[in-house]
Image (cartoon, grey):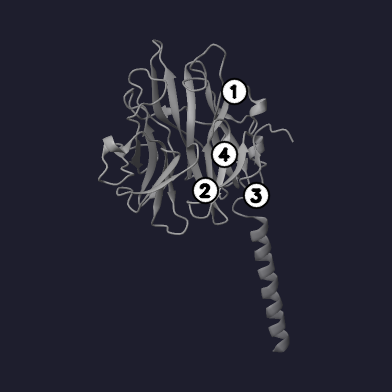
Amino acid sequence: MQAKGRMLKNTIQRITTVLVASLVLTPTCAPTDDWLRTLRSPVIFRGNATTAYRDPAAIYSDGWFHLFLTLTRIEPDGQVFEYVAWSKSADLKHWTPPKTFTPRNKSLNYSSPGDIIRFGREWILCVQTYPRPAGEQYGNDDARIWILRSTDLEHWGAPELLLVKGPHVPFPGLGRMIDPFLLQDKDDPGKWWCFFKQNGMSRSWSRDLKNWTFAGSARAGENVSVVVRDNYYVLFHSPENGIGVKRSADLKHWDDGELLTLGQRDWNWARGRITAGFVLDARRVPRIGKYLMFFHGSDYPEGDPRGGFDNFASIGLAWSSDLRTWAWPGKRS
């Protein structure tokens, strides 16, 4: 009986060893960037003399990357219109042509998608309006932030104004605000934060995305994007050039970190400015296993006053394992 017991114990140990080894050798998503290095160019969409692609935000769902962005068009008569547009890809190589889904209206100019979150049974996309009705270079004082709702990431409902200073402060009292970003609190999953550009980086919180409480401001640039790593909030923002990094344990006290310019010195399409870095945690996505950064780079052709803003802005891609060291297609070793 003792011999049979030892044999059974040894058999169980061998089976357990094989099972553990198989799990180690075949993870859900291999920690390698071999797949990403098959990409030939960091550029996803290239701007030209009449088109700018800016302000990317992305989500991965059901085998697809969904990329949202600002699409700016200069029409033949010189008028400029901005839209929120959408594209998708299964492999980060082949993207569907960007499709706009907001109105052609210079008094609105829906743009700057911040991010996409799952809230209950819906997807929520946050955006800004950026009114330029008289041909202003930048959005006027009526710029505000909004959310749209969807069940499939392709069809979106009517925009809802975010009253981020509380229900007692209606549209006129909100002041100019742009570049929203929604974030689930790392310590309180029922609590949601909205970051937005006003007096630096401002933030409000809500539990239902309808009733908001203003919580203050901090020093930062525009186009905020935040991920959680090692129980810290890692924030990416846009100073004058490059992508700035800040870290915080509590959203109140921020430590300044790196300033990322990626491959700007080698990229003619981004020689004017690197900005609007959006970071997607794709570590569990098959064949990826990394953080992905979508950003836009601007060129400023000589003699073109719109260069880099209304035209010649392009969407790029980079990736990282640790949010500190970044790679991209064609990076010099």
Q: Earlier in the sequence, mark 2 or mark 1?
A: 2
Q: Which residue is mark 4?
A: 244
The mark nearer the N terminus, 3 or 1, is 3
Q: Quadrant of the C terminus?
A: top right
Disc 4 + disc 1, Cβ < 8 Å: no
Residue 269's tag is: 1
As helix, strand or loop, the secondary structure at mark 1 comes to helix
Q: Nearer the viewer, mark 4 or mark 1?
A: 4
Instruction: Return the x and y of residue 137 as percentages of the image width and height.
Output: 42, 20
Mark earlier in primary sequence (4, 1): 4
Mark 1 Cα shell of 10 Å, populated few (<14), some (14-19), many (≥20): many
Q: Position of residue 240 (x, y in %)?
A: 54, 30
Q: Name the element at disc 3.
A: loop
**Mark 3 Cα within 10 Å, few/some/many (few <14, many 20+)?**
some
Q: Quadrant of the N terminus?
A: bottom right
What kind of element bears circle 2? strand
**Given contact means CB atoms under 8 Å apart, are the residues at marks 2 and 3 in contact?**
no
Looking at the rendered structure, the secondary structure element under dot 4 is strand
Q: To which residue does mark 2 refer?
A: 227
Per the model, the C-alpha gap separating discs 4 and 3 is 26 Å
- Precedes in sequence: disc 4 or disc 2: 2
| Left or right: residue 112 compared with residue 48 | left
Q: Residue 321's spot in the image, x, y percent?
A: 63, 47
Residue 283 position (above or below residue 318): below
Up the image or down, 244 lies above or below 250; here it is: above
- Distance of mark 3 from mark 1, alpha carbons? 30 Å
In this rendering, the label closer to the viewer, 2 or 3: 2
User: Identity of the amino acid at label 4?
Assistant: Gly
Instruction: Determine which quarter of the picture holds residue 257.
Output: top right
Q: CA distance from mark 2 to mark 3?
A: 19 Å
